[in-house]
Amino acid sequence: MPAYVIAEVSINDPEQYKKYTAVTPGIIEKYGGKFVVRGGDVQTLEGEHADSRWVVLEFLDENAARSFYDSPEYTNARAIRQSASDAKFVLLKGYDPS
């Protein structure tokens, strides 16, 4: 069953954050992931929403998503992101209608 990593990111240092976005696509791909959403305009339909960047990644399963997030490559990239932004990351299993 697919699994999704969903991130809400508030960027504090855009120049430093560009270094993060330059390296992450290759890491995500290496672990079998793909972008479903990568930034873009956000339309709030209900509730309050801060000015944040949203990213949704899809992986084959929860194990692949965790392998990506815990990988040495992403650990290094995460340090760059953490120096340039505040973020919330969640891992969700996909829906299985059976």
Image (tube, helix red, strand yellow):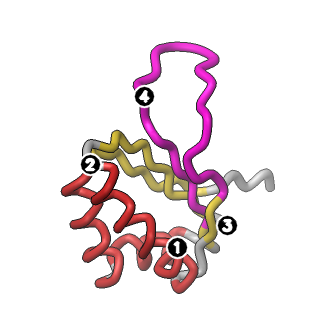
Determine the CA span between mark 2 and mark 1. Answer: 20 Å
Determine the CA span between mark 3 and mark 4. Answer: 32 Å
What amino acid is found at the position of numbered circle 1 in the picture?
Answer: Pro
Determine the CA span between mark 2 and mark 4. Answer: 14 Å
The label nearer to you, 1 versus 3, is 1
Give the farthest residue toward the top: 47
The residue drawn where x is 38% and y is 51% is 89
Q: Name the side, left or right, on which 98 lies relative to 39.
A: right
CB within 8 Å, label 2 to label 4: no
Report the residue marked by disc 1. 25
Q: Quadrant of the N terminus?
A: bottom right
Picture coordinates of residue 71, whole percent (x, y): 34, 81
Determine the CA span between mark 2 and mark 3. Answer: 36 Å
Q: Nearer the viewer, residue 57 or 41?
A: 41
Give the farthest residue toward the right: 98
Picture coordinates of residue 65, whole percent (x, y): 49, 70
- Mark positioned earlier in the residue sequence (2 or 4): 2
Q: Quick check: 52 above or below 89?
A: above
Report the residue marked by disc 4. 51
What amino acid is found at the position of numbered circle 2 in the picture?
Answer: Asp
- Mark positioned earlier in the residue sequence (2 or 1): 2
What's the magenta region? 36-58
Q: Name the side, left or right, on which 20 lies relative to 83.
A: right
Instruction: Say the numbered circle drawn on residue 6.
Output: none
* Magenta span: chief secondary structure: loop
Tag 1's secondary structure? helix
Magenta highlight on residue 79: no
CB within 8 Å, label 1 to label 3: no
Tag 2's secondary structure? loop
